[in-house]
Image: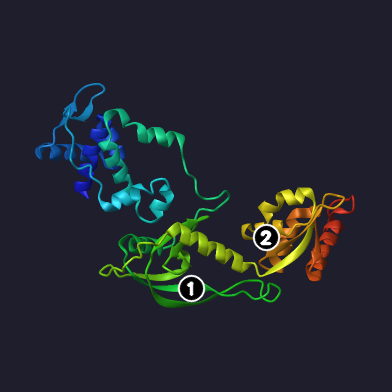
C-alpha cells in the first residue's frame, strides 16, 4: 500500500511540477505528516525530491528527472479504457486502479500536454443513469463477478430466476422461483439503465439475482476470442424484449398521440406498430396494431394518452378503459370539485 502511495507521489510531482504538502495530502488522502515522511523516504531511496521554502514553496523533482514507473500494468490499462464511466468502475471495485492508470498516463505526457486530462474533464462528462432513478448500492455479487470477468475465472453461483406472475386480478403481485446453483463462465458485464447484467457465452443474467458467487481463482476457462460482447448483448436483449410482447391491441390515435407514441410504447414494439399503421382518417387519426406485454400493461399505456387514443380491440380492454373514463367523468364532471366526506 505504501509503495503504491510513494509511486503516486512521484508521478504527481512529475505531472504537475511543484505541489505543497497540503495539495499532496488531499490527492493521496493522507495527512501532511505522512507526506513529509514519504518525501523523506523517497530522498533516502535516491529519488531527487526537493523542498522549496518560503511563500509559494512546496515539493518538486529535480529538473529533467523522469521516473520509469509510468508503464501501465494490464489491470490499469483495461481500467483506463473504462474511465469514462467512473460510477461503473467504482461499483466493480476498479476505481483506485483507474485513478492510478490515469495518473501514469498524465505523467507520461510531455509538459505541453499535461493539462489535457483536466481540459477534457472540463468539457465532457458522461452521466449514464436515467433521470429520476433512485440511488441504490451495487449488488454484492458484482465485485466477485467483475474479478471473474477480468481474469477469465469460472464461478459457481446461486441464481434466482424471476417466476412467471399470475394475472394481476388473482394475486396483485409477482414472486420469484427458488435459487439454483450452477457453474458459469463469465464473459462480460453490461450496465443498462442502472441494472447490471452478466453475459456468459450463451446467456444473460441479472447480477442482483445472484445470492452467492464462489470465485474459482485458481482456474481459468478458455475464452472464445471471436466473442463480441456488444453484438451479443444487442442480439440477446432485442430477442428478450420481443419475447415479452405476447399479445397486441388495436388502437386509434390522434396526431398528438402518434407523436407521443415513442415515449409511451415499448421500444421493441414501436417499429411493428408504425409498420401496421393505416392511412389517417378525415380527422387525422391513425389506426394501428400495438404489440404489448399484457392487457394490464396496455391499459396503463393507453391511459397515458388520455383522450387522444381510442381502443378498438380487444373488447375487454376497451371496456376496462371505458370504465376508467367514466370514473374520470364522475370526478371531474360536476362543477363543485371534490365531494365532502
Q: Residue at image x 52%, y 50%?
A: 129
Which of pointers 2 and 1 lies earlier in the amino acid sequence? 1
Q: Would you say residue 137 is visible in this rendering?
A: no
| The image quarter in which residue 46 lies | top left
Q: Mark 1 highlights which residue? A: 160
| The image quarter in which residue 61 lies | top left
Where residue 26 sits: x, y (%)?
A: 31, 38
Please give the label number shown on residue 10: none
Horizontal placement of 120 versus 311: left or right? left
Where residue 31 sits: x, y (%)?
A: 26, 40
In the rendered image, the residue lying farthest to the top is 55
Question: Image height check: is 198 above or below 48?
Answer: below
Q: Mark 2 highlights which residue? A: 272
Quadrant, the C terminus: bottom right
Q: CA distance from mark 2 to mark 1?
A: 32 Å
Q: Residue at image x 25%, y 47%?
A: 72
Q: Would you say residue 233 is visible in this rendering?
A: yes
Q: How is the image coloured?
A: rainbow
Horizontal placement of 244 versus 18: left or right? right
Amino acid at each position: 500500500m505504501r509503495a503504491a502511495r510513494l509511486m503516486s507521489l512521484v508521478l504527481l510531482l512529475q505531472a504537475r511540477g511543484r505541489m505543497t504538502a497540503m495539495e499532496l495530502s488531499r490527492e493521496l488522502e493522507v495527512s501532511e505528516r505522512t507526506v513529509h515522511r514519504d518525501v523523506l523516504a523517497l530522498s533516502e531511496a535516491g529519488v531527487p525530491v526537493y523542498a522549496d521554502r518560503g511563500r509559494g514553496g512546496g515539493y518538486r523533482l529535480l529538473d529533467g528527472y523522469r521516473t520509469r514507473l509510468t508503464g501501465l500494468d494490464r489491470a490499469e490499462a483495461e481500467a483506463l479504457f473504462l474511465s469514462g464511466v467512473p460510477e461503473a468502475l467504482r461499483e466493480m471495485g476498479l476505481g483506485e486502479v483507474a485513478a492510478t492508470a490515469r495518473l501514469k498516463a498524465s505523467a507520461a505526457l510531455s509538459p505541453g500536454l499535461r493539462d489535457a486530462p483536466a481540459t477534457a474533464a472540463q468539457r465532457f462528462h458522461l452521466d449514464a443513469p436515467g433521470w429520476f432513478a433512485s440511488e441504490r448500492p451495487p449488488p454484492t455479487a458484482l465485485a466477485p463477478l467483475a474479478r471473474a470477468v477480468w481474469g477469465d475465472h469460472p464461478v459457481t453461483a446461486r441464481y434466482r430466476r424471476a417466476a412467471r406472475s399470475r394475472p394481476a386480478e388473482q394475486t396483485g403481485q409477482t414472486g420469484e422461483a427458488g435459487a439454483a446453483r450452477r457453474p458459469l463462465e463469465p464473459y462480460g458485464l453490461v450496465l443498462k439503465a442502472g441494472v447490471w447484467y452478466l453475459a456468459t457465452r450463451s446467456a444473460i443474467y441479472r447480477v442482483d439475482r445472484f445470492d452467492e458467487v464462489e470465485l474459482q481463482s485458481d482456474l481459468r476457462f478458455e475464452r472464445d476470442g471471436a466473442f463480441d460482447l456488444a453484438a451479443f448483448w444487442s442480439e440477446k436483449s432485442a430477442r428478450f424484449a420481443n419475447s415479452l410482447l405476447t399479445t397486441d391491441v388495436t388502437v386509434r390515435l390522434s396526431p398528438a398521440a402518434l407523436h407521443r407514441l415513442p415515449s409511451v410504447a415499448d421500444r421493441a414494439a414501436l417499429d411493428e406498430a408504425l409498420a401496421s399503421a393505416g392511412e389517417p382518417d378525415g380527422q387525422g387519426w391513425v389506426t394501428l396494431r400495438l404489440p404489448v406485454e399484457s392487457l394490464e400493461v396496455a391499459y396503463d399505456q393507453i391511459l397515458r394518452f388520455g383522450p387522444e387514443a381510442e381502443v378498438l380491440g380487444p373488447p375487454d380492454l376497451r371496456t376496462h378503459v371505458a370504465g376508467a373514463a367514466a370514473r374520470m367523468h364522475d370526478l371531474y364532471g360536476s362543477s363543485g370539485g371534490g365531494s365532502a366526506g
